[in-house]
Image (cartoon, rainbow, N blue to C red):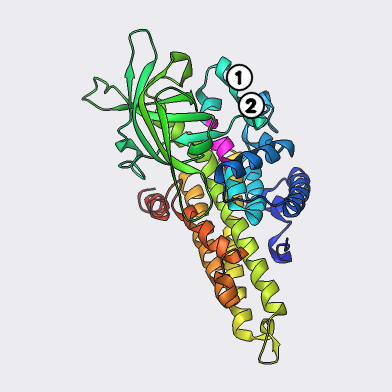
Amino acid sequence: MIAAPRVLDRRLGVIAGDPEPLRALEDRLEAFAAAFADAPVDERDEVAATRTYVARLADAELLRHVVPARWGGASPQLQTTALCLVRQWLARSSGALDSAFVMQGLGSYAVTLGGRDALRDALLPEVVAGRRICAFALTEPEAGSDVAAMRTTAIPQPGGGVRLHGEKCFISNAPCADSYVVFARERDAGDGGKPRYGAFWLPGDAPGLTVEPVHVIAPHPIGTVRFDGVEIPEAHRLGAPGDGLKLAFSTLDVFRISVGGAALGFADRALAEAIAHLQRRVQFGKPLAQQQGLRFAIAEVAADHVAAQMLVYRAAALRDQGQARPEDSALAKLQATESAQRVIDRAVQCLGGLGVTVGSPTERLYREIRALRIYEGTSEIQKLVIARALFEG
């Protein structure tokens, strides 16, 4: 694997203010990346690839960063800086590998926050060990950015628990998930008919749950999930009745910044590929790297990329210190994902026809980066958050 350029690598601990633990983590990630390059996985079988990736991540003890120490994790509370660092390194190798990592956290964190002790004790060690593949079921056909518009319903049952009816779409890991966190509209409260929302855990083999795989432009196990009277016992409710959106937003608050980390990894790889190509490709009697126009083009996107890196790790450090505001994560995700798109586009242009050849790293990156500007809050939603902070305080 081509290494990331010197200007972009190995100083993230300084940014976050606590370098030693992060340097040790980087050493492990570097070894993992080298082993990954020596034993690539065929990602055309998305389900098999995801299962393989989760097992490898568990063996490397990287899944310890998505669960608190009480259940086998690496630290008492999840550290956003570590999440970003892991995702940056994994994304350099594979977007599917990065997704396999983050979904173990995204799909279990609401259980960490709101699950009963028996459920947490049973599930979370399995997540760390890679024996449970997780999914986070929030998005619906009519409830994307406007999650409060969800129509999946949780109907109370006389003996306790609820029955789940409805549909979720674009759910990562749906075709292979053993564990779901699902958000649903509960019976409207008496307060002027204002709806309330609940959060629930259910196993992937629950009767009445069906999955229809959906194929997107980059290898990724994703699908539509339907609930036809799925029974959920009261013991599998997460939080109190009405806590659903609070748990959903609390989960996204932890993991949204790490989307920027994945974008940084994609951009790292794109820059490395572009620089290596320009150094070896000879045109008009000299390497392309000696063409001033191309040198300036790469310098420009590199500056854009390093600025994104600063914003991502600034936001992560603030969150780990309990000082983050919504606009911090919005600035980080917006800048990192949008600038990564620009970096990758420039890399494709530098490689010419090789850049769009199916199977080349830049062609893969061009497909993989696009979704990051959409999921866990579109770029437009991030702009709304930033603008609200600027104009409304």
Front position in the image: 241 or 14: 241
367 w.r.t. 231: above or below: below
- Could you tell me which quadrant the N terminus lies in? bottom right
Q: Which picture quadrant has residue 317?
A: top right
SS at circle 1 = helix
**Residue 103 located within the stretch drawn in magenta:** yes
Instruction: Give the CA separation, mark 2 to mark 1.
Output: 7 Å
Q: Is residue 193 left or right of residue 168?
A: left
Q: Confirm whether residue 272 shows in the render.
A: yes
Q: Position of residue 274 (x, y in %)?
A: 64, 71
Q: In this figure, which residue is indicated by the disc labeled 1?
A: 122
Q: Nearer the viewer, residue 329 or 291?
A: 291
Which one is in front, 334 or 124? 124
User: Image point 53% across, 17% down: which residue?
Assistant: 116
Q: Is residue 17 above or below residue 252?
A: below
Magenta span main SS? helix
Q: Which residue is mark 2?
A: 126
Q: Examine the rendering and report whether any part of residue 309 can be seen.
A: no
View extreme (top): residue? 159
Neighbours of disc 2 within 10 Å: few (<14), some (14-19), many (20+): some
Residue at screen point 54% across, 42% down: 255
At a point 56% along the width and 56% down the height, the residue shown is 263
Disc 1 crowd, CA 10 A, few/some/many (<14, 14-19, 20+): few
Highlighted range, magenta: 101-109
Residue 298, horizontal then vertical, whole percent: 61, 74
Q: Residue at the spot x=52%, y=67% of the render? A: 342
**Pointer 2 and pointer 1: residues touching (CB < 8 Å)?**
yes
